[in-house]
Image (cartoon, coloured by chain):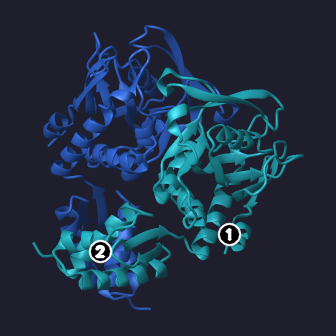
Chain colours: A blue, B cyan
Amino acid sequence: MKFRRSERLVDMTNYLLDNPSNLVPLTFFAERYGSAKSSISEDLTIIKETFEQRGIGMLTTVPGAAGGVKYIVKSNEEDSSLFLDEMCDIMAKPDRILPGGYLYMNDVLGNPQLMKKVGRVIASAYAEQEINVVMTMATKGIPIANAVASYLNVPVVIVRRDNKVTEGPTVSINYISGSSKRIQTMLLSKRSLEEGSKVLVVDDFMKAGGTIKGMTDLLGEFNATVAGIAVLIESEDTEERLVDNYLSLLKLSELDTKDKKINVTKGNYFDVIAKTK
Amino acid sequence: MKFRRSERLVDMTNYLLDNPSNLVPLTFFAERYGSAKSSISEDLTIIKETFEQRGIGMLTTVPGAAGGVKYIVKSNEEDSSLFLDEMCDIMAKPDRILPGGYLYMNDVLGNPQLMKKVGRVIASAYAEQEINVVMTMATKGIPIANAVASYLNVPVVIVRRDNKVTEGPTVSINYISGSSKRIQTMLLSKRSLEEGSKVLVVDDFMKAGGTIKGMTDLLGEFNATVAGIAVLIESEDTEERLVDNYLSLLKLSELDTKDKKINVTKGNYFDVIAKTK
């Protein structure tokens, strides 16, 4: 069965989007459509240009017998900036203030369209680095970790505060919550993380950074290394930051429970990606 | 700026895949590309045929001034069947057996490629029904719920066993775990679910169904209704099932801790979708 160029473009676009960061040999597409490799190359040129123009991502071509084409997620800065502006507005709604000065975020974390965009923006910052695993803390970090991992095409591992029979043997550490100064425990299923993994640590919210510091300490127990730290929102209201070299999409600069006022600005995202260029 | 057909096909494919179950007016695309509506219609015919042929999904067109085009996820039965066979093999690996006869599933739940496919298959069964929300129980159900909700383009709400300050006011119920017969508590943030919502309840594993029964009871407290129940894997080893009318992708028919043997077959998926046709 032969496929016309127009059909190939639709199917290849779907295939590449579904398999990010994955090297696809040109012969795979050539066989899939019964087409010459030269036609596939022309198709890929069209897709590459459109992906770049519309801020969908990059197509990189690896030449040679073991070569192929790879889709790498890359949100353009203008789109990312507009999206972060939108997120600032969403997060600054006064009815998010909870007793004790906490921020209600369940609706945002449960919104698949927003999470996809958060995932795209974070993944774009790390797509050209070697990341083997995305790690997060249960429960609120999970939707963000899933979204990021889906674009980087790597597994997610989930650190928990409580042990469950379904985890199998675990490795646990004690850590000090930066804000409340309480000693807490976190644990990770032993077989969920391979030695030597390069790990991107993500979370929804960071104040002093105690939880994230704990996760990076836990990585040491697995002989794994931190390849990056990314949070959706960091709070400016902290005396001491326990981690540096993190990336934040948003910054909570004010949360006034008395006057019901929240101020959210962009985090350090654009500063961080400018440095890695 | 004018776009060629080939560029439009690539960008429209990406846009539609990114916005499932969403009615997109033809004028949106016409303006986006500076093209006549007639050209957009021709583009959509090509995309529709390719989506159907490759088992990506359906494009439905709503005529009239308020009309447009909608992408609905629809995995074809052959692809779904092949995927479920693959999942049976993955789940039947003997080293998944944990002490107490539990099944280790973290690697599967943390694999974004597998979760996307699980999400596609479950969402395909419900894409033509009215679903407003996907609900699950923390922690293991979350990746499945996220994947399903992403294809149905609806929010996820997460039921928890423990209360957290970041949930705000909650509604809680007691329920009896079907297998262990223990009384447990589950709770849901009050503002996370609107009255009258039609809810798809999903979870990773179901034995007697106590947790799922609890979630459906909790929905009653929100005057919300159950639009469907879907689980990744059900266990045959149960005296009494507390829920009926569920959909399962897989069935654990044997887990022998002594001989280290697991047997996993397809669940009732194809029977259920045959009935709804």
Q: Where A178 falls versus B176 (above or below)?
A: above
Q: Is residue B57 visible?
A: yes
What chain is tagged by disc 2? Answer: B
Q: Where B123 falls versus A95 (above or below)?
A: below
The image quadrant that residue A57 belongs to is bottom left
Which residue carries the number 2 mark? B26
Q: Is residue B232 left or right of residue A45?
A: right
Kindly identify the amino acid type of the residue bearing the numbered disc 1.
Ile
Question: Which element type, helix, strand or loop, lies under badge 1?
Answer: helix
Split into 4 quadrants, where in the image is the N terminus of chain A?
Answer: bottom left
Q: Is residue B76 left or right of residue B249?
A: left
**Residue at 34% across, 19% down:** A207
Give x and y (percent) for residue A215: 43, 25
Few, some or many residues within 10 Å of mark 2 (<14, 14–19, 20+) = many
Split into 4 quadrants, where in the image is the C terminus of chain A?
Answer: top left
How far apart marks 2 and 1 lie (CA) works out to 31 Å
Q: Where B75 falls versus B146 (above or below)?
A: below
Give x and y (percent) for residue B161: 64, 29
- Furthest residue in direction top, as rendered: A181
- The foreground one among A121 and A15 is A121
Few, some or many residues within 10 Å of mark 1 (<14, 14–19, 20+) = some
Q: Is residue A25 visible?
A: no
